[in-house]
Image (tube, coloured by chain):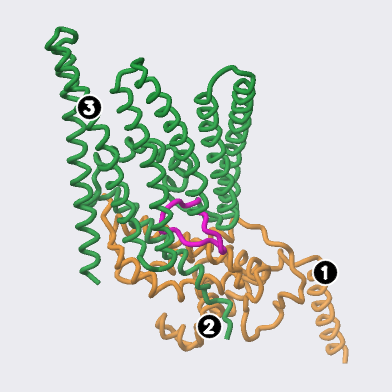
Amino acid sequence: MYDKHEPSKEFIDRLEWEIGGEVRRRNRHARVPPWVPQSGRTAVLALIGIVLVSMAFGAAGIAAAYQVQTSQRRGDLISGLEQRAEVARQRLKLSIDAQTNTERRLSLGHGNQEDVLEARAKAAEAEAQAQSLESQIEEVRVTGREPSNEISAPIVKGRDFVSERLQMEMAVPQAVLELERLRLRELERSVSLGAVSPLELEAAKSRIAEADGGVQAFRKKLEIRQQFLARKIDAATAELRILEAEAELNERALAPKIELARKESESTAAKVRIGAASTMDQAEAAMRLEELEMERAKANLDLARVRQQLDQRRKGR
Amino acid sequence: MIQPLSEDEVDLMYRETIRPLYAYVSRRVGGDRSLAEDLVQEAWMRALDNWSVKGVPNEPLAWLLRVSRNILVSHFRRIRPEQLEPAVLDLTVEGPRLESSTPETAAVIGWGMAQLRRTHADILEAFYFDEKSVREIADERSISERAVEGRLHRAREKLKRKLKRRLSPTAFRAEEGKTQNVRQTRAQQRIH
């Protein structure tokens, strides 16, 4: 028989998830777990810059200390988000105008394809930000709480806001990737003509690897999200899988950078031998290489720690 | 100093307490789901604040109920409930249950309870919302059943006086009309 004083299953699940997330968040502040690599995490976020930017769109959801409790607070929250959304809409309008102008200039024979792609990338970023904020507003309207971007957030009234926002934000690294690929093609032409150093080509490949890492990171997150929603993995495992994916991508994205730094170091050493560069330049290039190798070692350590945690969870079952 | 909470322990406590906690709050807000959910969530957030500093209490449910009660009182002190028709809230009957059957009634009753002294509110809550018998209340407080009945009566009278302010003008007239009728009857009885 229906009892009006019985909580709905949806509410029980949602609050359980919120409390679990809140406990984890507080515990992270109280005591950093051994598997959370503070410096490594920073490195992950620094490396996948595009991911950082897009994740920042939902920072409100992560930074919130308390959830919105009353309709008054819900109103305040929506009001704040709407102000940000209005700014984002203005920015989007300006970006689209700039893109249209660039395309028109290209059609008239001025400018180049790279300018158009650069304008498109900026417009894509502005659009993703505006859409993400709209989505956050809709979520707050439904839940009355801070929007959540956690991979283990529950479905809200049949809508998967987390996946929706991931899809929106993935457009940013995709646009950047397209731009970097075009730049690479241009560079390859210039290198074949001998107008540009082959090292420039390596730098472009490194940027492509970064942008591609950003796209892959979003795809991986979406995949883990789907597994969580299908109840194939639990919330803690989902969060660990995200850390694992980020550490993997970090490690993978560092490889071309290290290769570039090694070539630059060798090139500088050769220049020093013929007196075209100073020993200071050589030392700087060597230090850069060592820094990157240290980053890779940290990324490997992070990955090993996360995998150990995942392994322990699997054995614990 | 913030102490890490065990996620599993908190989860277990949550599962054990959510239903009685929700029922406690829901009965006091007339089954208003949205409000009950907000207040229950507020209680749990306060629990996490407190427990991460002072540790988990021995009786988590009792702790949550006590905090929920304070949250309810704060909530009802903030609101200004709509005026009610007398048919919705019959205060003249000494009767069975003061059930907050609708959110509107609950808002008025909750507002009235929040204005009462703690002792009066506690005994009314135990009897009407928690549906405890006079004997149970007497046993809990180590007093006689007669004392409980007396306290219930006085608390109810206090609540009636508070709630009268929230009845619509027609209710006042109805109440006054009843009083006049009683006076007339008594006068006639004295004449005869």
- Badge 3 marks a residue whose secondary structure is helix
Q: Which label belongs to residue B131? A: 2
Q: What's under tag 3, amino acid-wise?
A: Ala
Count of all numbered marks drawn on residues in the image? 3
How far apart marks 1 and 2 lie (CA) works out to 31 Å
The residue mark sitting in front, 3 or 2, is 3
Q: Is residue A155 a member of the stretch shown in magenta?
A: yes
Q: Which chain is green?
A: A
Q: How many other residues sit within 10 Å of disc 3, few (<14), some (14-19) or many (≥20)?
A: many
Q: Main secondary structure of the magenta part?
A: loop
Residue at 45% across / 64% down in the picture? A15
Magenta segment: A147-161
- Badge 1 marks a residue whose secondary structure is helix
The residue mark sitting in front, 1 or 2, is 2
Q: What's under tag 2, amino acid-wise?
A: Glu
Q: What's under tag 1, amino acid-wise?
A: Thr
